[in-house]
Image (cartoon, helix red, strand yellow):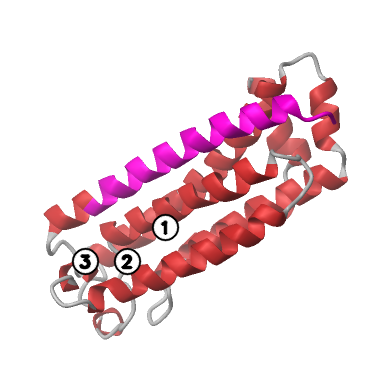
Amino acid sequence: MRNILRKELTLSASPATYFFLIFGLMFFLPGYPVLCSVFFVTLGIFKSFQNAREANDFVFSALLPVAKRDVVKGKYLFTCLMEMTGFAVMTVATLLRMTVLKDVAVYRENALMNANLSALGAGLFLFGLFNLIFLSGFFRTAYSFGSFIGYIAAAFLAIIVFEAVHYVPGLGAVNAFGLEHLGLQLCLFLAGVLNYLVFTLVSYRHACRCFERIDL
């Protein structure tokens, strides 16, 4: 599996995937929907799948002396590694905004979602959504990218909901500054972690079943 992951990182990956990881720094931007940074990271991962398809990487990988399930596992490991790298960048930006920058006026006057633990939980939900919709959908054929359109629609609908929820009466604490309402923030963050794990596991199992059935 180590060799498969190395192939993904060095041969199959598009340079755009690594470039788009820096969009995690969008969590520093005031007056901007910070969750769009998650979409850009997933867009970079999508570029690697495009690159792999055009280079017939899936056929090549299936011809290697490994199980087809391991081909899927390699793609999922690569995807999760890129997601967690982008998430680490977002986390650093968020922790700085929650501590050192918590009283900066430009953030205090921000009408959109604040960068806090709740936002990180929402980011994990979006990453899980990418895995659930795009990855499992792609491996039905290992060719069609139609599921990415479905992911775009679902992701931006979710972003709109996350951006609007703190305007609902009684839910303003979701958009807490710094370490305010830390208990609620931690609960929402852990909910995001759980969603990511469940979505990814369900997606992986479905993708394995589909890829083993198709004739490349």
Quadrant including the C terminus: top right
> For mark 3, what is the residue?
174
Q: Are marks 2 and 1 in contact (CB under 8 Å)?
A: yes
First-in-chain label (1 vs 3): 1
Amino acid type indicated by mark 2: Ala
Magenta stretch containing residue 191, yes or no?
yes
Is 207 drawn above or below residue 42 in the view shown?
A: above
> For mark 2, what is the residue?
115
Amino acid type indicated by mark 1: Met
Quadrant including the N terminus: top right
> For mark 1, what is the residue?
90
Q: Are marks 1 and 3 in contact (CB under 8 Å)?
A: no
Amino acid type indicated by mark 3: Val
Q: Please, what is the dominant secondary structure of the magenta stretch?
A: helix
100 sits left or right of 55 in the view: left
Residue 204 placement: quadrant: top right
Span colored in magenta: 188-216
Instruction: Give the camera-side residue of 87 and 138.
Output: 138
First-in-chain label (3 vs 2): 2
| Neighbours of disc 3 within 10 Å: few (<14), some (14-19), many (20+) | many
